[in-house]
Amino acid sequence: NAGVTQTPKFRILKIGQSMTLQCAQDMNHNYMYWYRQDPGMGLKLIYYSVGAGITDKGEVPNGYNVSRSTTEDFPLRLELAAPSQTSVYFCASILQGAGSGTQYFGPGTRLTVL
Amino acid sequence: KNEVEQSPQNLTAQEGEFITINCSYSVGISALHWLQQHPGGGIVSLFMLSSGKKKHGRLIATINIQEKHSSLHITASHPRDSAVYICAVYGGSQGNLIFGKGTKLSVKP
């Protein structure tokens, strides 16, 4: 199994540009998450999904959108990038929710908005 | 006040020392996770526990639900243990993990 994969690894955007961060998992996990990690801060939940077709906002959803058309894929869309969105983004998945076992993380995407 | 507090924030140890990292939380939980973030940025899950104690190699995690406290111990520490250790609890309002800010451990040879 490849586990959780994320692309790209690094990206520089100009203010106002848009992009999609890709996330895929091959473990048939129902739950998938997008987090951002700012320096010196804990991981913050942006959006999550409990299954295909179902998504919900996390703690910091503003400026982002997600979709979950398949069990495997959970892309994160940034519209009108802003410097405040400079961060490291992690995608994660778990079989049946955060109390059910090991949460698997992707390698992260380092995004800089200039 | 953060719902998950870790201490210390930074820790430097000599190789071979016994390490303890603490995590206190203020919300009711059903599970607690310990994660390790490598210097390169990758995050791996070390333990999930809801009571008692778990051991994996040189790592031991304990939790006291009544005191809302967990500890991660590393025996015979090694430079390769150098990483950020993150505590996260499950049981928040959105049913997802709430993360501490992490403890940065540096083990010197």
Image (cartoon, coloured by chain):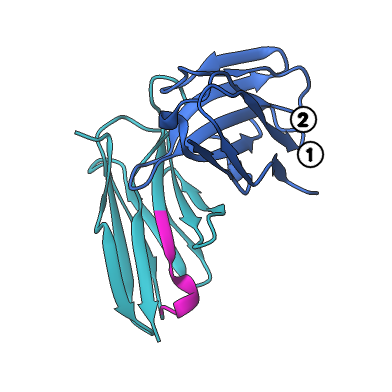
- At horizontal 54% and vertical 60% (from top left) the residue drawn is B40
Disc 1 sits on a residue from what chain?
Answer: A
Which structural element holds mark 2?
Answer: loop
Whether the residues at callouts 1 and 2 have beta carbons within 8 Å, the answer is: yes
Residue B5 shows in this picture: yes
In this figure, which residue is indicated by the disc labeled 1? A26
Residue A83 picture location, percent across and down: 43, 31
Are callouts 1 and 2 both on one chain? Answer: yes
Q: Amino acid at mark 2?
A: Glu
Q: Amino acid at mark 1?
A: Asp
- Position of A104 relative to B1 (above/below): below
* Chain with colour cyan in the figure: B
- Position of A8 relative to B94 (above/below): below
Q: Toward which corner of the image does residue B100 lie, by quadrant?
A: top left
Q: How many marks?
A: 2
Residue A102 shows in this picture: no
Residue A103 picture location, percent across and down: 58, 42
Taking the view exactly as shown, the residue that stands out farthest to the left is B1
Span of residues in magenta:
B77-85
In this figure, which residue is indicated by the disc labeled 2? A72
Q: Earlier in the sequence, mark 1 or mark 2?
A: 1
Residue B60 picture location, percent across and down: 43, 64
* Chain with colour blue in the figure: A
In the picture provided, is A30 more to the left or to the right than B79? right
Of the numbered discs in the image, which one, if any, rests on residue A1?
none
- At horizontal 46% and vertical 67% (from top left) the residue drawn is B59
- Position of A50 relative to B108 (above/below): above
> Is A101 inside the magenta-drawn segment?
no
Disc 2 sits on a residue from what chain?
Answer: A
Q: Toward which corner of the image does residue A22 lie, by quadrant?
A: top right
> Is B84 inside the magenta-drawn segment?
yes
In the picture provided, is B63 more to the left or to the right than A47? left
